[in-house]
Image (cartoon, rainbow, N blue to C red):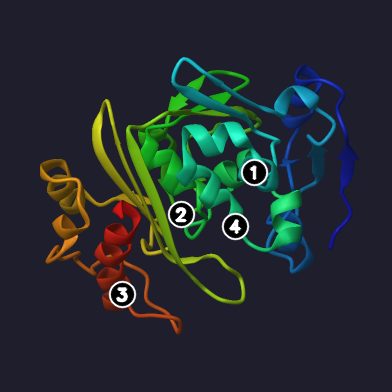
């Protein structure tokens, strides 16, 4: 691991200035970034630790929206009675991320910013039509996720919170890799004012995506049976030692059916 400078700003404005430095990286929970640095996959010149910013932590539910501060841990989301009441599937998702250490250190903002192709939160954000708030603007989830580890964030831009509209119905199912607990395939389904949305993580070679074939079927009938017979094209899906692209394609409607219940 190469040498780097370290800053722990006391305010969001100070963090923004530090994040604008050349080759600086924001440090949230550190579960992905620090591991990448240890094996030489990332070598930032500076780390800007957001851990001291209380303004980026916390959960509120108001006006049919669940708003979660970027530095709120997965464990806090999973344990929140407000989240469990408003969007039970989101609380379930948070409770199944990684292991206890990851859940108590990892943050929703860090996960959304990293956009790992097998991470869980991107599926929830896309399916629920979430809004990503930054220190500069707001970004709709449909416009935010751009591909493999790629987002609409500009250099130095800081996620401050994520807002999730409360759906009429929602569900989450994940078929996880046993060691890492990342999703081989994860499917989040939601029915709300904008209609039915189905988002898939773990399967796509370019990261999270919407399964329109399942959306169309579930829009006609919100039932597990509606997922029967839906075929997902394996072209463009991941294939590795854990499962072929065809295997992942077959899992998607199965998990969607279970998520609908």
Q: Residue at x 42, y 48 (%)?
A: 123
Q: Which residue is mark 3?
A: 245
Indicate the secondary structure of the residue bearing disc 3.
helix
Which badge, 3 or 1, comes first in the chain's sequence? 1
Disc nearest the viewer among 2 and 3: 3
Quadrant in which the C terminus appears: bottom left
**Does residue 200 appear left or right of residue 121 in this picture?**
left
Which badge, 2 or 4, comes first in the chain's sequence? 4
What's the CA distance linking mark 2 and mark 3? 17 Å
Q: Residue at x 61, y 76 (%)?
A: 179
Asked if labels 4 and 2 touch by Cβ distance under 8 angstroms, the answer is: no
Q: Which residue is mark 1?
A: 110
What's the CA distance linking mark 4 and mark 1? 13 Å
Q: Do we see residue 157 in this rendering?
A: no
Q: Which residue is mark 2?
A: 148
Q: Position of residue 148 (x, y in %)?
A: 46, 54
Q: Residue at x 42, y 80 (%)?
A: 240
Q: Position of residue 150 (x, y in %)?
A: 49, 46
Q: Quadrant of residue 229?
A: bottom left
Indicate the secondary structure of the residue bearing disc 1.
helix
Q: Which residue is mark 4?
A: 97
């Amino acid at each position: 691991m190469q040498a780097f400078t370290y800053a722990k700003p006391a305010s969001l404005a100070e963090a923004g200035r530090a994040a604008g430095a050349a080759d600086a990286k924001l440090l949230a929970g550190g579960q992905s970034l620090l591991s990448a640095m240890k094996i030489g996959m990332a070598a930032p010149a500076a780390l800007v630790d957001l851990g001291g910013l209380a303004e980026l932590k916390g959960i509120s539910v108001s006006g049919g929206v669940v708003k979660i501060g970027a530095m709120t841990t997965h464990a806090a989301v999973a344990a929140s009675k407000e989240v469990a009441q408003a969007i039970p599937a989101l609380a379930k998702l948070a409770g199944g991320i990684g292991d206890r250490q990851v859940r108590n250190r990892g943050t929703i903002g860090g996960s959304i910013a990293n956009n790992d192709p097998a991470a869980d939160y991107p599926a929830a954000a896309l399916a629920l039509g979430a809004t990503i708030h930054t220190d500069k603007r707001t970004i709709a989830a449909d416009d935010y996720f751009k591909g493999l580890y790629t987002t609409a964030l500009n250099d130095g831009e800081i996620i401050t919170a994520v807002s999730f509209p409360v759906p009429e119905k929602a569900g989450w199912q994940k078929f996880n890799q046993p060691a890492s607990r990342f999703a081989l395939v994860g499917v989040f389904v939601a029915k709300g004012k904008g209609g039915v949305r189905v988002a898939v993580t773990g399967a796509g070679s370019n990261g999270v995506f919407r399964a329109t074939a399942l959306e169309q079927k579930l829009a006609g009938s919100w039932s597990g049976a509606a997922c029967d017979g839906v075929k997902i094209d394996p072209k463009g899906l991941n294939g590795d030692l854990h499962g072929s692209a065809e295997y992942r394609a077959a899992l998607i409607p199965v998990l969607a059916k279970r998520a609908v219940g």
